[in-house]
Image (cartoon, helix red, strand yellow):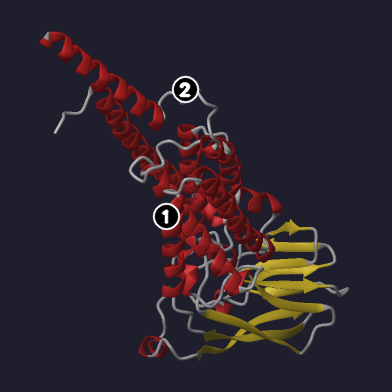
């Protein structure tokens, strides 16, 4: 067996160094996304902030009814939205029956001294309340909205903490865990009661969605070995952008957060779309190394930063999304699978046989017959065979000359 020539060893070394650089890039950017992406994730309607769960909050109504006042559940049961279209201002009472929120024609006002104001900043009930938040203190009202609509978290209408014993005994059974939560609302000297219930609704099995993700990743790796890999990988990248955009649309339509908060929360998706567009352009132009690098970056933003934090939603029944739960899970699963396949195809490109991505149309051009007498392109298989036959003929002639 002949030893490898220097020209064969150098590309192998470059391939190894390229793979290590890309692997290091993945680890570095994944760490940066996790550390620096805490803000955007908290604004994500699925996977952070308002999180997916198996607890469904329902509103029964207000008794006695208050003209012009309505309440609905938003953000997948994480918050309540009270709208007051009436002429009278209403006051929501906190956990110690202290004035907490005022909602009326002048907007929404929050009592800065209410213990509920501090406690509701977290989705889990806080045990330690600072001394400056006291139910006995004189209310200090701060206007937080000019609209007569208050969106607030209330621990009385949201289950947090460990699952109740009945749920732990039978997680597959739908059951009521809080039959009658209540929030007092005052109108003048009269008090009405906003009430509802909390129900445990088992989520679907995550395994079919996991299988979809794995199948899509395997499909991406399979087509990355084909002769038309440049266009195929460009199409995969475009499809990943579409599935992530569907997911992001559900986030936007299902969130009650301000526009700027939602923009900040979707920053990683926006960055992933831009990088993916650059990757598609490079791949279609036949610029292999640049195409792989940008495809790798797009996969990190779309799959690791966008879809991976939302994996728990695949097994939850209550999703804070404006889209159908089935469509939301499909978008998460597809983005994760396509992104994982893109990442692996970029890292293992040479090993998968994608080391010579050609520009679009190059494959067809290579198949066209050459005119008689035309030399084959340098580096092609025909040129290598011609060079080898020429070298073999020269050696034979040398041996014959030496034998005379």
- Which sits in the foreground, 259 or 395? 395
Instruction: Give the image quarter of residue 355.
Output: top left
Front residue of 151 and 116: 151
Q: Is residue 338 above or below residue 23?
A: below
Classify mark 1: residues with Cα within 10 Å, few (<14), some (14-19) or many (20+): some
Q: Residue at left 52%, top 26%? A: 372
SS label for mark 1? helix
Pointer 2: what residue? 375
**Residue at (17% x, 9% y) in the render:** 401
SS class of the residue under badge 2? loop
Q: Looking at the figure, which quarter contains the N terminus?
A: top left
Instruction: Locate residue 325: give its quadrant.
Output: bottom right
The residue at the point 42 percent across, 55 percent down is 222
Compared to residue 320, the image places residue 189 above or below, namely below
Disc 1 target residue: 222
Q: Is residue 214 toward the left or the right of residue 136 in the image?
A: left
Residue farthest to the left, as pictured: 403
In the image, 404: left or right of 296? left
Q: Earlier in the sequence, mark 2 or mark 1?
A: 1
């Amino acid at each position: 067996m002949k030893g490898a020539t220097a020209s064969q060893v150098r590309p192998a070394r470059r391939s190894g160094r390229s793979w290590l650089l890309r692997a290091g890039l993945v680890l570095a950017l994944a760490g940066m996304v996790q550390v620096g992406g805490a803000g955007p994730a908290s604004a994500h309607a699925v996977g952070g902030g308002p999180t997916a769960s198996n607890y469904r909050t329902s509103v029964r109504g207000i008794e006695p009814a208050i003209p012009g006042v309505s309440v609905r559940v938003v953000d997948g049961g994480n918050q309540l939205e009270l709208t007051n279209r009436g002429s009278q201002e209403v006051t929501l009472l906190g956990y110690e029956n202290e004035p907490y929120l005022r909602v009326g024609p002048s907007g929404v006002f929050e009592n800065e001294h209410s213990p509920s104001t501090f406690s509701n900043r977290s989705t889990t009930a806080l045990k330690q309340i600072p001394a400056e938040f006291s139910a006995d203190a004189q209310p200090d009202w701060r206007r937080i909205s000019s609209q007569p609509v208050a969106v607030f978290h209330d621990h009385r209408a949201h289950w947090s903490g460990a699952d109740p014993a009945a749920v732990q005994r039978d997680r597959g059974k739908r059951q009521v865990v809080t039959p009658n939560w209540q929030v007092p609302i005052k109108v003048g000297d009269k008090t009405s009661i906003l009430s509802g219930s909390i129900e445990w609704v088992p989520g679907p099995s995550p395994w079919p969605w996991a299988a979809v993700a794995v199948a899509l990743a395997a499909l991406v790796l399979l087509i990355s070995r084909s002769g038309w890999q440049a266009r195929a990988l460009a199409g995969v990248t475009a499809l990943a952008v579409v599935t992530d955009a569907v997911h992001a649309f559900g986030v936007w339509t299902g969130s009650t957060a301000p526009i700027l908060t939602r923009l900040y929360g979707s920053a990683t998706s926006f960055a992933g779309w831009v990088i993916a567009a650059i990757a598609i352009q490079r791949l279609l132009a036949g610029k292999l190394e640049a195409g792989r690098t940008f495809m790798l970056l797009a996969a990190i933003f779309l799959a690791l930063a966008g879809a991976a934090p939302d994996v728990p939603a695949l097994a939850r029944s209550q999703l804070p999304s404006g889209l159908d739960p089935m469509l939301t899970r499909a978008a998460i699963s597809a983005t994760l699978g396509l992104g994982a396949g893109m990442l692996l195809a970029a890292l293992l490109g040479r090993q998968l046989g994608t080391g010579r991505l050609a520009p679009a149309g190059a494959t067809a051009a290579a198949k066209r017959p050459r005119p008689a007498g035309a030399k084959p392109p340098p580096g092609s298989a025909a040129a290598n065979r011609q060079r080898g036959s020429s070298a073999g003929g020269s050696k034979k002639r040398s041996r014959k000359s030496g034998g005379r």
